[in-house]
Amino acid sequence: MTTDAAAADLAEPQPLFCYRHPDRETWIRCGRCDQPICLRCAMQGPVGMRCKSCGKPSRDPLTALTLQQLILGVLVALGAGTVGGYIGLQMEFFFAIFLGPIAGGLICEAVMRVTGYKRGPRMYAIVFGGILVGVLIAAGIYVRTFYLGFGVPEEEFPMELLFSEVLTGGLVYAVAAMIGAYSRFR
């Protein structure tokens, strides 16, 4: 009779216990490392169930940027941000509020196209940084061409008027453009 009991034990598989939760009984093993996993720890992989460590991709394709994508994204963000900032500084306050979000959405779309529609915090930094730095570059160009280019000596020029006009217009445009870019990310 002992041989029958031993044969029955060999024929019936014994339940396994999850390697992360030893109190949970399971019949599932990881398809890669062969560790027993419970349903809470299991992830659906390309060829079956995987544990959390084997199921996590080594590189997230949705947020990872190659060097070429990063460089193109930064260049497009700075170029489009500068052009948009230059136009935004020439607009009146009212138009900057309404046209800034459109320009921000276009800048975001251009950057997303050259980077392959990536997402994540790096993309936010590239787009928002491109808008802000572009407005600063555009403000420098704007000051140089429209105010200092008319032959007025710098010491006679009312700088407080210039800074209040450029900073106010630039800030309003930059905030409106960043709101437009953020809405385009969603």
Image: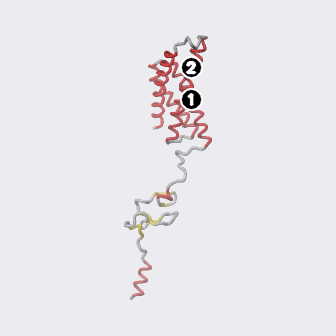
Q: Is 142 above or below relative to 28?
A: above
Question: Which residue is located at x 46 percent, y 28 percent?
Answer: 175
Residue 159 at x, y percent in the picture: 52, 16
> Is disc 1 surrounded by few (<14), some (14 to 19) or many (20+) residues within 10 Å?
many
How many tags in the picture? 2
Instruction: Tell us which disc is closer to us: 2 or 1.
Output: 2
Residue 51 at x, y percent in the picture: 47, 60
Residue under label 2: 142
Identify which residue, 113 or 86, lies in the foreground. Answer: 86
Task: Report, in whole angstroms, how far the alpha carbon at label 2 lies from the one at label 1.
Answer: 16 Å
Question: Which residue is located at x 40 percent, y 84 percent?
Answer: 5
Provide the secondary structure element on which disc 2 rests.
helix
Q: Quadrant of the rendered structure where residue 150 is?
A: top right
Q: Is 8 above or below relative to 70?
A: below
Q: Quadrant of the rendered structure where residue 66 is?
A: top right
Provide the secondary structure element on which disc 1 rests.
helix
Query: Is residue 101 visible from the viewing direction of this image?
Result: no
Residue under label 1: 80
Query: Is residue 93 visible from the viewing direction of this image?
Result: yes
Please state which amino acid type lies under the numbered disc 1.
Ala
Residue 184 at x, y percent in the picture: 47, 34
Identify which residue, 142 or 75, lies in the foreground. Answer: 142
> Is disc 2 surrounded by few (<14), some (14 to 19) or many (20+) residues within 10 Å?
many
